[in-house]
Structure formats: C-alpha cells, structure tokens
Image (cartoon, grey):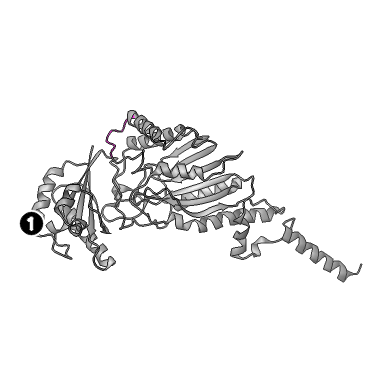
Amino acid sequence: MTAARWLAGAVLLAVFVGTTGCGIGDLSKQSETDRCRWMSSPTPAAGRTVILVDASNSTRGSAAGNPETGGPAPHYRQAFQKVVQDAVGRRDAVSVASFSGTSRDLAWVVTGRSTDWQRDVGNEHNQQRRRSDAVDCLTREATPAIGATPLAAGTDVLQAIRFGAGAIDRGSRGGHLVILTDGLSTAGCADLTAIDRWTDAEITAIGERCARKKSLQPGDLSRIDLSIIGVGHSGPGYPMSPDARTDWLTTLWKTLCVRGTARSCRVEDQPVSGTGSTPAPSPTVDDPVVALAGRVRVYPVPGAALFDGDSATLRRDGEAELTRIARSIRAADWVQVNGYAAPHGEPGFLQRLSQGRAERVGDFLRGHEVPVVSSRGLGVTRSCPDAALSQRLSPDECSRRVDIVVGTS
C-alpha cells in the first residue's frame, strides 16, 4: 500500500469513527443547534424528571417598600441548574413548566428532552462534552419558566404537584418531581389564606379535606421521588414567617407527600439564593395574602376618598380617613399597602400613579406609628374584592382603590 492510499484510508476511518461516536469525533466543533439536537428523542428506558417553577408574585423579586421584611426573593435560576445537573447525571428525560393561578394547565417550556449523554457516543471525552451540553441546553431552554409572568392570581401548589406527577411515565424506574416554590398555596384544598392556627391538628384537617375532595389520594405519587425546594421563603413585600411557621409549612408538605405515597419526600426550607436579578412582581395580578404572621384583615379604601383624579397627593379629608384607620391598626404585627388604578390611560402612567399612591399612604401610616413593611403599586385592576364595597361603588371607583393589608398574631 502506498503512503498516499494509507493516509486516505486513515482519514476516512477517522471521519467514520467520529461521526458514529465510536471514538475520536470532536463534538466541541458542532454548532449551538447541533449540540442540542440529539436531545430531541429520549430513550424508552430513560428515567423521567419533571421540574415545576412557581411563578406567583410571592416568589418574585424587588418590590417597593422595605426589602428587609420580606427577605431576598427566591433565586430559582441557580437552584434550577443544580436540579438539572442531577437529572443529567441520571441521564433522565427532562420536562420543565411554570405554574400559577388555579388552571389545570401547566405552562410547559421543555417536554421530554433526552439527557442520555452516553447514547451512541463511545468516546469518553465526547460523552463528557455532551453531558455539559445537556446542562447548558436545558438551562437555556428553561429560562422562560424561571422568569415566567403569573397567568392569574394565587397558586394551587398541590394541584401543580399532582399534574406534574401525571406527566411522568413511571414505568419500572419511576421518576423525579421537583417543585421550586415558597409553599404558600392560596387555592384548592391546601388553601392557606384562611389559616390562623398553625397546629398539627390544622395539618391533619388539610390532609383530610384534600382526601375528601380527591385532590390527593394514596398512590397519586407512587414511584416518584418528590422534592420541594424553597418552602417558607418569599420575596420582598411578603412578610416572612417565624421559624415555627416555616417548620409548620415544611411539616404540611411532607405530610401531603406521604399521603400521596411518594417513593421519597424531600422538603427544603433553606433560602434559595444566588447572584443576578430575579423577576419583578407582576402589577396586573392581585395575589391573595397568606397570613403567616397570624390573621389578616384587608381595609379597601376607595381612591376617590383619598386623592383627586390622576393625583398622588393626599387630600385633607383623605388624611382624616387614614388617621381613623391608623388608630385601629397600630398594634398590628405588619401592614402592607397595595395601590391600584382604573384601566383608563397609558399603562406606564397608571403603574406610576398606583405606586405613588401606595407610597403616600404607606408614609402617612408610618408617621402615625403603623408598622408598614411595604408599599406596592400594582397598576391596573378590574376587581373589587369586597362585596359591600362593590354595592356602594362603581367598578371604576372600586378599581381606583388602596388596600391596607393588616396582619396580626
């Protein structure tokens, strides 16, 4: 064999080996699209990991007012990457969605992505390259879920768990279900907005209520390893629970997990921290408040009683009304002020107007020894949550309101 023919044969062999993954192909030279293309079809025997991200306002970032009371917003991006690394290590098929409101639908952004970095690749260097690419591709593709805008007010965490479990083909290997949430469910059988007794009996009552409504039955979580990460840690403007209340929340979710007979239950109440920005609260969603500091009462005050049209300057008779309210709420553990605007005008102006009005009311109440922890402008609303108020006011008058949310032990 001549040297030229030998060299040509060697080149062809190298190309063949590289493209079939049997030895020395260099995956690092592939395009960004090619690096992720192999993930489109998981192997039938692969395990399953489903990751759900709570998009409700209580899990989101900076809000006006005192950021120290609510603590830093949960930084789900960094926690998510760790979960993805674990799933890739197992070579699972991965699906990712966000959830909010009470809809049965999860907002899927990734479904059934393969992470089997060993499949069809025999070269160890290329296997490790694919393993790294799988983490990068999933992290990038899942960004819409991590920064998703809530689609509706509140959240039904248990419902998200059930539907996440339903998305797992349990087969012989079962799967992993990971929920990134503060655990503050405001709808469904585990609705915490009316809770004012943080006792074991209350946890039992929630479990029994969920069983009666068939919201969680034994076997619903069978062959599933459930992890709930970030319980008890909400963003600024949402009063944090004392340690005892965080323990209560952790026990609640462990109890519900066991009731669903999950293969394993892990509930983490450590702060979910990281670097970089976190999504801001949506001004168009009016989330219910969970009274982790005790009982909650809402004083809805019509904007017309406090301000002139398109103004954030308190009128004298508005000050008199707030003084009357201040006298009755000085003993509260915390107070949160939420400002709203009627849906007429340029959205940016209405957002600034609602913020200015909330801040003015918050400042006035602080000046009267009321423990205001945050003042938030939530922009346009069409809701009127108080039935008696809706009978006295038109929808527009009700939507131009300021809610004074009062929490007491």
Which range of residues does the magenta coloring cover? 194-199
What is the residue that sits farthest to the top in this orientation?
201
Q: Is residue 38 left or right of residue 379?
A: right
Q: Residue drawn 91% across and 69% down? A: 2
In the image, residue 18 sits, relative to residue 203, either above or below, namely: below
Residue 197 falls within the magenta-colored stretch:
yes
Q: Is residue 230 left or right of residue 317?
A: right
Identity of the amino acid at label 1? Asp
Q: Nearer the viewer, residue 226 or 285?
A: 285
Name which quarter of the figure residue 241 lies in. top left
Q: Residue drawn 13% across and 59% down? A: 314
Q: At which x and y percent is residue 27?
A: 66, 61
Q: Residue drawn 27% across and 52% down? A: 66
Q: Nearer the viewer, residue 398 or 78?
A: 398
In the image, residue 379 sits, relative to residue 74, either above or below, namely: below
- SS of the residue under disc 1: helix
In the image, residue 333 sits, relative to residue 27, either above or below, namely: above
Q: Nearer the viewer, residue 383 or 51?
A: 383
Name which quarter of the figure residue 215 lies in. top left
Q: Nearer the viewer, residue 359 or 341?
A: 341
Residue 331 falls within the magenta-colored stretch:
no
Kindly tell me whether residue 89 is visible in this rendering: yes
User: Mark 1 packing: few (<14 Cα in 10 Å), some, or many (20+)?
Assistant: few
Magenta: main secondary structure equals loop
Q: Is residue 218 left or right of residue 390?
A: right
**Residue, disc 1:** 317
What is the residue that sits farthest to the right in this orientation?
1
Kindly tell me whether residue 270 is visible in this rendering: no
Q: At which x and y percent is residue 246?
A: 35, 38
Q: Quadrant of the C terminus?
A: top left
Name which quarter of the figure residue 407 lies in. top left
